[in-house]
């Protein structure tokens, strides 16, 4: 009995060795190929197309290209949302103070609708003007390479009601290395970013949803945020990449 048992053990070990070697090779292959698999081609194509206009808005308005691209990716579903495809609107900017075409308006439901652009690049430029409103002035204390503070600051200023909005932007920026676009580097996430105190109602601020602040939120007077944020102190104008509907910031959100 003992001889047969020992023989089975001897035959068993080579099989285990083969399986171990196979598992080790598979693990090494997965470890090497995993980083490349985390980057989807649809995201890379979107970044390649819009990184230049994002850098342009950074130069002209001071909004970090990393933040702009991450927001565009997130809010337009990588350019595949219905609004992005049909209205070239990648940021859900509503049609307040707008003299161009309007998308999705409804008189019966009292929906003002969204701005429709001649090109997605016009949406990018209009979004940068929106962030020059007085509500977001405090963001410009951060360096354009400090994407973590900008992401958290947008939330603190009331841009989005989604409590996870900063984390979503940061995940996109770091996964696709967007921080390198403007000469920045990956930041250490172990230290919390500086918080900005918001003057909004605390009960409203505790609400969390996937909606963006500038699309839906209203203040105590029930006036659209777009109407509240218009300020002659921030009047700037630019020529859209295509002739169309982008107006001066006096008419913008």
Image: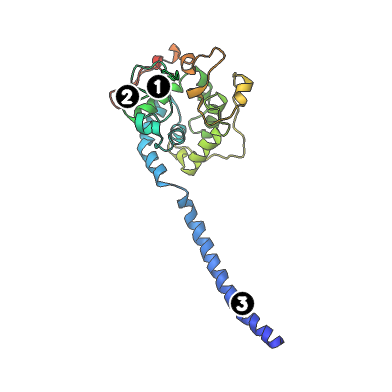
Rate crowding at label 1 as few (under 14), some (14 to 19) or many (20 or more) other CA atoms within 10 Å. some
Does any portion of residue 100 appear in the rendered image?
A: yes
Nearer to me, 176 or 221: 221
Camera-nearest label, 1 or 3: 1
The residue located at (50%, 41%) in the rendering is 174
Q: Quadrant of the N terminus?
A: bottom right
**Looking at the image, is mark 2 or mark 3 earlier in the sequence?**
3
Nearer to me, 5 or 237: 5
**Looking at the image, is mark 1 or mark 2 earlier in the sequence?**
1
- Mark 1 lies on residue: 105
The answer to whether residue 216 is above or below residue 167 is above
Q: Which mark is residue 237?
A: none
The alpha-carbon separation of the residues under discs 2 and 3 comes to 71 Å
In the rendered view, does 4 fall on the left or right side of 56?
right
In terms of secondary structure, where does tag 2 sit?
A: loop
In terms of secondary structure, where does tag 3 sit?
A: helix
Q: Which mark is residue 240?
A: 2
Q: Which mark is residue 13?
A: 3
Q: Quadrant of the C terminus?
A: top left
The alpha-carbon separation of the residues under discs 1 and 2 comes to 23 Å
The answer to whether residue 230 is above or below residue 179 is above
**Looking at the image, is mark 1 or mark 3 earlier in the sequence?**
3
Q: Position of residue 37 (x, y in %)?
A: 46, 51
Rate crowding at label 3 as few (under 14), some (14 to 19) or many (20 or more) other CA atoms within 10 Å. few
In the rendered view, does 235 fall on the left or right side of 197?
left
Q: Position of residue 114 (x, y in %)?
A: 40, 23
- Callout 1 touching callout 3 (CB < 8 Å): no
The alpha-carbon separation of the residues under discs 1 and 3 comes to 72 Å
């Amino acid at each position: 009995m003992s001889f047969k048992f020992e023989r089975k053990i001897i035959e068993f070990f080579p099989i285990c060795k083969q399986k171990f070697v196979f598992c080790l090779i598979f693990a090494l292959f997965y470890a090497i190929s995993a980083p490349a698999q985390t980057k989807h081609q649809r995201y890379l194509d979107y970044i390649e197309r819009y990184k230049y206009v994002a850098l342009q808005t950074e130069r002209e308005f001071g909004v970090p290209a990393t933040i702009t691209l991450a927001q565009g990716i997130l809010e337009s579903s990588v350019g595949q949302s219905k609004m992005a495809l049909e209205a070239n609107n990648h940021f859900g900017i509503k049609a307040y103070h707008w003299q161009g075409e309007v998308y999705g308006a409804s008189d019966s439901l009292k929906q003002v609708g969204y701005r429709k652009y001649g090109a997605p690049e016009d949406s990018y430029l209009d979004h940068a003007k929106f962030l020059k409103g007085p509500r977001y002035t405090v963001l410009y204390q951060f360096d354009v390479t400090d994407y973590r503070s900008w992401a958290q600051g947008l939330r603190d200023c009331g841009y989005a009601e989604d409590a996870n909005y900063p984390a979503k932007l940061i995940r996109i920026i770091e996964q696709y290395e967007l921080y390198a676009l403007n000469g920045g580097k990956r930041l250490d996430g172990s230290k919390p970013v500086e918080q900005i105190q918001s003057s909004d109602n605390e009960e409203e601020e505790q609400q969390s949803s996937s909606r963006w602040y500038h699309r839906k939120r209203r203040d105590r007077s029930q006036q659209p945020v777009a109407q509240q944020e218009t300020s002659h102190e921030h009047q700037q104008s630019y020529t859209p990449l295509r002739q169309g509907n982008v107006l001066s910031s006096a008419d913008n959100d």
